Amino acid sequence: MIEYLDLLMFMVLFGAIMLGYPVAFTIAGVGVLFALIGMATDHFDFILMGALSQRIFGIMTRDVLVAIPLFVIMGLVLERSRIAEDLLEEMGRLFGSLRGGLGLAVIIVGALLAASTGIVGATVVTMALIALPTMIRNGYSNSLAAGTVATAGTLGQIIPPSTLLIILSEVMSNAFQQAQIEQGLFTLETISVGQMFAAALLPGLLLVGLYIIYILVYAHLKPAAAPALSAEMRGQVSLKRIVTILIPPMALIIAVLGSILGGVATPTEAASVGAMGAVLLAGFRLSDGNGSNHWLAIGTAAQISVVLLAGAVTVRLQKDVVSWSEYALGALIIVMLCLAVNALYISLKRLYKAGMLAPITTNTMTITSMIFVTIIAASLFSLVFIGIGGEERVQSIIAEMPGGPVGALLFVMALIFILGFFLDFVEISVILLPIVVPTLIMMGHDPIWLAVLIAINLQTSFLTPPFGFSLFYLRGAAPREVTTGQIYYGVAPYIVMQLLGIALIWFWPNIATYLPNILF
């Protein structure tokens, strides 16, 4: 039994998670328990635990991970200020005249919210409260409506920016470097968040296209299960209102993604711009009609101007010789920054008066803490697992898989898919991937392409019962007439669509590698 201590460690972890204990504490507790067992049986050198403090320090000081709470703030502000609700209502009116039109609206809005928020829970709950009752009242089958809402919410994990892609880029970059070191290379390449965002963009849009095709085909084959909205329920379509509601989130998406993919800003800098942009949009949305909107508009324009100026010119007033024009430009930038700060103050004040600021900050701290605690706990787990020889066992299993590199990748993808039934994407990313990915890279698989395949596979963990988070979110917000069985039945075709998406990217790697090769 002792010689299989590493396998026993994984079995105890799954058993403890199935019992319902908090995941982060379970992972850390199992790691400490098996460290003690390994030390007692001379299978683990406890001196290795001294590296834990360095690992924690490295995690907490990693600049790229700072983007996570900023993107979380961005998503929560847009969700709480009802910008997402406006998008759903207007898109529903626009596509409501088509059979399956409400389903199309949910998918399209899910994609827009994914690109502007990346928060799965917020997107699923918002659409479950607004779109799901409307779809059911209009005659949609409960399973189709529930499956569409649950699946549209998960797009936030594959369409950038997303916390999954940020965590995955960090894990894949470390694994890529480890593989290069084991191959004897001294000039190491890395994988950036920008590369991950670029690689995931087209596959994310591919999934959106597959979902839309499925809804249209379903509505054609079963018209009674996905009828068009009646004119009375649809209401008057206002092109002006659609443009007014659609342009601000699109501008935010372009500002955040464009700055990262264009190399203008780092992911953390772009995330800060996105968070401030979301706060300003919320300020406009929560207008109190007291005439302060013009100051908000001036401040927003000033902030955009400062960003553009920063990319065009460099103002350094601490030089030995400074011209009057540079002093004048510096003074102008200071004035614009003051106007931008004033606009942020107005927006934050409106969020506070609306009772939204406290929940936003509290939820941001909760979500961020959960992610970082899980990453730290998984670091402890992997340290012990490697120390008792688990890494060598897993690598030997992968290397001996029939079919060579293809067989090994099929095995790992199947393992990730099965683990997705029981574990969250964070646990899979930071526990399993650092162990299996270096071997796959050394077998010749492109790391960017591999990362996208894994990202879509991990996305399915939100939809696979019994522990799919999207299913939990939907179950809590769905009307009582929607049963849990109908939710499971409704997401099943979308899981098939995601597996089809993985197959398409497998056979046509350029879908994932084209944009990174062009931009980077």
Image (tube, grey):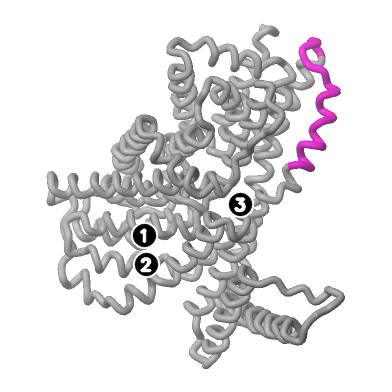
In front of the other: 147 or 497: 497
Q: Secondary structure at mark 2?
A: helix
> Which of the two residues, 439 or 293, is positioned nearer the viewer here?
439
| Marks 1,2: beta carbons within 8 A | yes
Q: Amino acid at mark 1?
A: Val
- All told, the count of numbered labels is 3
Q: Secondary structure at mark 1?
A: helix
Q: Residue at x 47, y 38 (%)?
A: 452
Q: Which residue is mark 1?
A: 109
Task: Label the magenta part by its dominant secondary structure.
Answer: helix
Res. 398 in view: yes
Q: Is residue 69 visible?
A: no
Taking 348 as reference, is 386 left or right?
A: right
Badge 3 is on which residue? 367
From the viewer's perspective, tell me whether residue 456 is left or right of residue 262. left
Viewer-proximal residue among 376 and 325: 325
Q: Residues within 10 Å of mark 1 (few under 14, many from 20)?
A: many
- What's the CA distance linking mark 3 and mark 1? 23 Å
Q: Residues within 10 Å of mark 2 (few under 14, many from 20)?
A: many
The stretch drawn in magenta includes residue 302: no
